Image (spheres, rainbow, N blue to C red):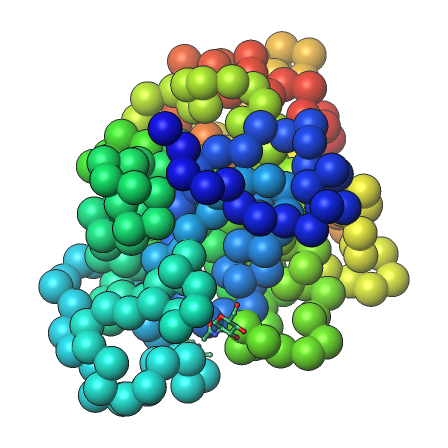
Amino acid sequence: MRPATVLLPAALAASSAAAQGVRILQTNDDGWAESYLREMHSSLLAAGHDALVSGPAENQSGTSSRDAEPEPRTEPCQFDSCAANSGPVGSNATDPRLNWVNSFPVTSLKFGFDTFAPQVWGPGAVPDLVVTGPNIGSNLWLQVPFSGTIGAAAESVKNHGVPALAFSGLTATHNRWDVSPVPLESTLYAQLATKLTNAVIASGTPYLPEGVFLSTNFPKVSSSRCSKVDDFKFVLTRINPFGFSGPDAPHCGGDTSLPTETEVVLNPTGCFVSVSVADASDKTTAPADKQAVVIEKLGDFFTCM
Ligand SMILES: *[C@@H]1O[C@H](CO)[C@@H](O)[C@H](O)[C@H]1NC(C)=O
Ligand SMILES: *[C@@H]1O[C@H](CO)[C@@H](O)[C@H](O)[C@H]1NC(C)=O
């Protein structure tokens, strides 16, 4: 049984009526108090989802799949978001959906599953989906193995059996959760990530084939060109260049070689988002049979370049 649903202002609740609300566990590697993560949280709540954050107490960028028992903190968390000597894990004093872990992204995810999910959703409750990021900065090809945002998504699939979506944005600005005004990139990346999240959910369960996650990169935000959700098109991509693996599943008129992420997000003729089907075991391009399932489910969502 689902406990109390998220309370939303009437207008937000009405606008989200079309999407089915599900339980989403969020983490990142830039820190629990970063604006990108918090805007994503607000955006998921506004879309009617039951979202919960368990993120690292500070910047853990580049920590891949590292995992270690959290140590008690002596210093305040990132941006003074927790007091000094607050212990190894903690929560926002008034909002139990916002939690930190004094360790790596993968460890934060574990505490999300084992500690915070049961606290907020009830005993034995598990998320329907894990969403990581948006990461501050890209996670393209050679960057992928080092990213904690990617590491946590892979961990969710491999060791928790829960489908995962990793998001990263090329515009890289660090801001505290309560920055005012909220930067355009924080809001826009959150809206774009929510759009894909909703499409994955609308495609029905199982949301993704076994053993894979989606790794998405957003191009740079520009107030003159790429400034609102409808400016952006989503393109199915591969992580490593064709030749390292392939062929890909037929897509866009039967083509069996997908573009690389880099080609897509740096394409100057538009605002293109890359979405790769990633193998959770080695964080490379997933095999064609897995890509084919994603194309079957989400084909209409993608644009051909
Ligand atoms: C976060 O950590 C990464 C890796 O150590 C570093 O490159 C980046 O500058 C840090 N960000 C901030 C805001 O300190
Ligand atoms: C904690 O939550 C409250 C209420 O939502 C908010 O005003 C405050 O900024 C949050 N602080 C942190 C560090 O998350």
x, y (%) of residue 240?
44, 39
Q: Residue at x 81, y 42 (%)?
A: 230
Closest to the observer, 156 or 216? 156
Position of 141 with respect to 20 (left or right) is left
Quarter location, residue 14: top right
For residue 27, above or below residue 195: below
Quarter location, residue 103: bottom left
For residue 121, above or below residue 296: below
Most distant residue in the front direction: 4
Q: Residue at x 39, y 46 (%)?
A: 25
x, y (%) of residue 303?
72, 28
Q: Quadrant of the N terminus?
A: top left
x, y (%) of residue 150?
38, 49
Position of 20 with respect to 156 (left or right) is right
Q: Residue at x 28, y 69 (%)?
A: 90
Q: Quadrant of the C terminus?
A: top right
Quarter location, residue 67: bottom left
Closest to the observer, 121 or 157? 121
Position of 159 with respect to 176 (left or right) is left
Q: Residue at x 31, y 46 (%)?
A: 117
For residue 132, above or below residue 1: below
Position of 36 with respect to 280 (left or right) is right
x, y (%) of residue 270?
79, 45
